[in-house]
Every structure is written in structure tokens, then in C-alpha cells.
Image (cartoon, rainbow, N blue to C red):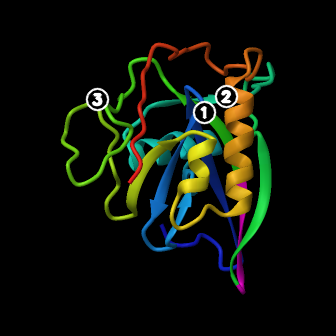
Amino acid sequence: MAHIHERIDFAVAVFVVHQAKVLLVHHRQLGKWLPLGGHIELDEDPEAAALREVKEESGLDIELLGERPPTTGPGTRALVAPRFLDIHRISPTHEHIGMIYWARPKAGSSRPDDGRAGPAATANPCELRLAKAEHNDIRWCSAEELDTLQPPLDPSVKWYCLKAIEEISASSWPPSASGADCRGLAFQPTLK
């Protein structure tokens, strides 16, 4: 999507974690490994943008993790809070305010057999779907595998990956926004 404003846009970044592995994509245009995500469109809220971007870029249905205040009422809808916020420069004259979410696949969501989706991927609902127009690769990575990615992972993205794996793998965190669970899914990454 084109920029909504010439100087600043709002965007989402979604770190999807399952079984201590985080889902990353190799962005075709930027030439680097990133979480799933993108611009928040004018007709959507941050939650809707996060769900849409992950579905478009991987085929997964996800559950955003975090707190939703009990303040929904007439004319108000409480949203799941992002885990972090940042502002990052896209060009010398343009920035993004990033809403950084933790998430996990919903129970019954697409389950990759080998953790990857590339040229051999089919329409099988048990595989990740690679958004070929935007990405060169998609894969699940453990904390150790983050150091093997080529090109190397940006230090800030690596920090978020490690923090997401750590927190989502902890037994008491995160609070679930919907109560759904997917502990029975078995993802197996394969690296190039």
C-alpha cells in the first residue's frame, strides 16, 4: 500500500511464536528478514491490520496476545494493546510508528509440515503460504537459528524475536485476548 501520509504512517509488526520458534519473512524489496506486518489501512484498526497482514503474508489465522481492557461499551471498543511501540525511519523524509504485537497461530490454523513455504508449496492447508510478490522466503526460527539467517538479522528485530520467544514460551505469559490455544500444533523448521 502507498503511504497514507507523506511524513509518517502507522504500521504493525507481528511476532508469531509457536513452540519456541518465531515466524520471519525475507522481504523481497528490503532484502532483509522481518516479522510479518505492514501499514494500517485507513479503514481498519491496528488489530484488524495485524490479523490481515499475517493472513496475507503467511496464510495463518492468529490470536493476538496481550491485554484487552474491560472498557468496551457504547461507542467504544477496547483493543489488544501492542507489546511495544517504536518509531523507525523508512527514508530521509518518512517514518513509521510501529505497533509491535506478539501472537500465536489459532488452533486449527494452517500447519506447515516442514516450517517453510517456497516454490514447492502447494495449496495444501497444512503449509505456510509465501506471499511471493513481497517475500523471498518464510520460516520458523528458534533462538539459535536466528544467528544463521542470511543476510544477518537486524539487531533490533533479533531483540524482539528473542523477547517474543522468551515471553510466549513462559508458562504465565502472555494473557490471551480470546482464550484460544494451539499447543497441539507441531512446526518443524528447515533452514537453507
Q: Is residue 94 magenta?
A: yes
| Distance of label 2 from label 1 (alpha carbons) | 5 Å
As measured in the structure, the alpha-carbon distance from the residue carrying label 3 to the one carrying label 1 is 19 Å
Q: Which residue position is annotated with label 1? A: 103
Question: Above or below — where is 158 with respect to 176?
Answer: below
Q: Position of residue 76 (x, y in %)?
A: 74, 31
* Marks 2 and 1 in Cβ contact (< 8 Å): yes
Circle 2 — which element?
A: strand
Q: Which amino acid, by three-letter code, is at mark 3? A: Cys
Q: Residues within 10 Å of mark 1 (few under 14, many from 20)?
A: many
Magenta range = 92-98
Q: Nearer the viewer, residue 190 or 101?
A: 190
Q: Position of residue 49 (x, y in %)?
A: 55, 47
State the count of labels. 3
N-term-proximal mark, 3 vs 1: 1
Q: Residues within 10 Å of mark 3 (few under 14, many from 20)?
A: some
Q: Position of residue 79 (x, y in %)?
A: 71, 33
Label 3 residue SS = loop
Depth check: give the residue in front, 182 or 64.
Answer: 182
**Image disc number at residue 45:** none
**Quadrant of the image occupied by residue 19:** top right
Residue 99 falls inside the magenta stretch: no
Query: From this viewpoint, is residue 79 visible?
Result: no
> Residue 9 sits in which quadrant?
bottom right
Q: Amino acid at mark 2?
A: Leu
Q: Which residue is mark 2?
A: 65
Q: Quadrant of the C terminus?
A: bottom left
In the displayed structure, 78 sits above or below 141; it is: above
